[in-house]
Amino acid sequence: TAAVAAGLALVGLVLLWSVLEPAPSAQASVTGGIAYDVAVADSHAFVAAGVHGLRIVDVSTPARPREVGSYDVPESASGVVVSGRRAFVFAGGALYVIDVSDPTRPRGLGVLAALGPALGAAVGDGHLFVAGGELASAGNRGLHVVDVSDPARPRKLETLTVFGPPTSSVARAGNRLYFTAATTSNASAPTQLVVANASAAPALTFAGALPLAGIGADLDVRDGVAYVAAGGGGLRIVSLADAARPVELSAATTSGCARQVAVAGPRAYVVAGSSLDVVDVSNPAQPKPIGSTATSPRVGALAAQGAHLFLAAGTDGLQVLDVSTPTQPRLVGTYLPGR
């Protein structure tokens, strides 16, 4: 799940039109590459664009996105996290730390070359917490703690290994970290929601776990509740009030295998099969599906910001949806990479 802090996440050839008027005046902008992941901060979209590296796009005027900067990396950029003046880009098993204080002139600061493939990361207190999944080598599977307090010299300090390899990204709330992991070394085994204590980071300690129905693929944490996209298990909703004993509150059936989830306000947005499902979670114990729309079956990342959703859909590009009417989500923009 990509993080969106402000504005719109738009990269590549973006076709946007007003949701109040017809489309003939749509504006276009080209950056190229595939939008694997997106983070937005201070009206700029930071895009992991495959072989085109990191692309930085000014989205202060959402209908007229404009590329203002870029940074090439030796391998295909597949993930990005932004915190303050730093962008952390994952590419080819390495971590690149980039100064983006001036988005028009991003500068490389440091590289950690042997991190291994990452499913995602969270930032906090000078540390980057990185989920290394099944595709990583045996020594790089688990939840890694990377010291980024000196951005010129990122260092992997610790790795927490529990059960099998992580199967989702990692979410951070306070001193707790949350991710899903297989129950055995086989990533297709049943999964558990894992809670780790990061209060003494870089040392991490296991706090608790909850077996899940289905295969945990993504999660979001809001107000002491975890929302887990659990494949054939749909959307699982878990109370985190007691970190040692997370308790499942409820579940919602989805249109297909739930792969991605993002929560904004009283709504959970779930990518399931070839659909986007909207679930009312104003009462987490009683979720109510309220809307759905067809979308790309290739969506691999989802972010929510205000009345918009941003779906990174691989070769189908980045899709922007208006969810101001949650019962009728509508596609309002499409990024077509390299066209």
Image (tube, grey):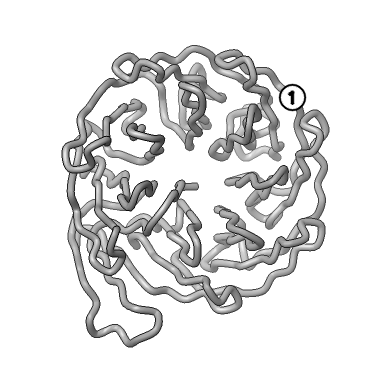
Residue at x 72%, y 64% (from the top left corner): 253
Which percent across, then down, holds residue 32? 20, 54
- Answer with the quarter of the image where residue 287 lies: bottom right
x, y percent for residue 104 = 17, 43
Q: Residue at x 39, y 38 (%)?
A: 82
Q: In which quarter of the image is residue 163?
A: top right
The amino acid type of the residue labelled 1 equals Ala
Secondary structure beneath dot 1 equals strand
Task: Pick out the residue farthest to the bottom.
Answer: 22
Pick the residue in front: 121 or 91.
121
Q: Is 30 or 115 nearer to us in this picture?
A: 30
Foreground residue, 328 or 232?
A: 328
Residue depicted at 44% across the width and 50% down the height: 4
Which residue occupies 36% across, 55% down?
314
Mark 1, Cα crowd under 10 Å, few <14 / some 14-19 / many 20+, is some
Q: Identify residue for label 1.
A: 207
User: In the rendered image of this protein, does residue 241 appear above or below residue 44?
Assistant: above
The answer to whether residue 281 of the structure is visible from this angle is: yes
Q: From what the image shows, is residue 282 above or below residue 87?
A: below
Say which of 137 and 250 sits in front: 250
In the rendered structure, the answer to whether residue 60 lies left or right of residue 262 reads: left
Q: Does 107 appear above or below 145?
A: below
Residue 91, compared with residue 308, is above or below; it is above
Please state if 166 lies on the left or on the right of 44 as rendered: right
Percent position of residue 317, x then y = 33, 60
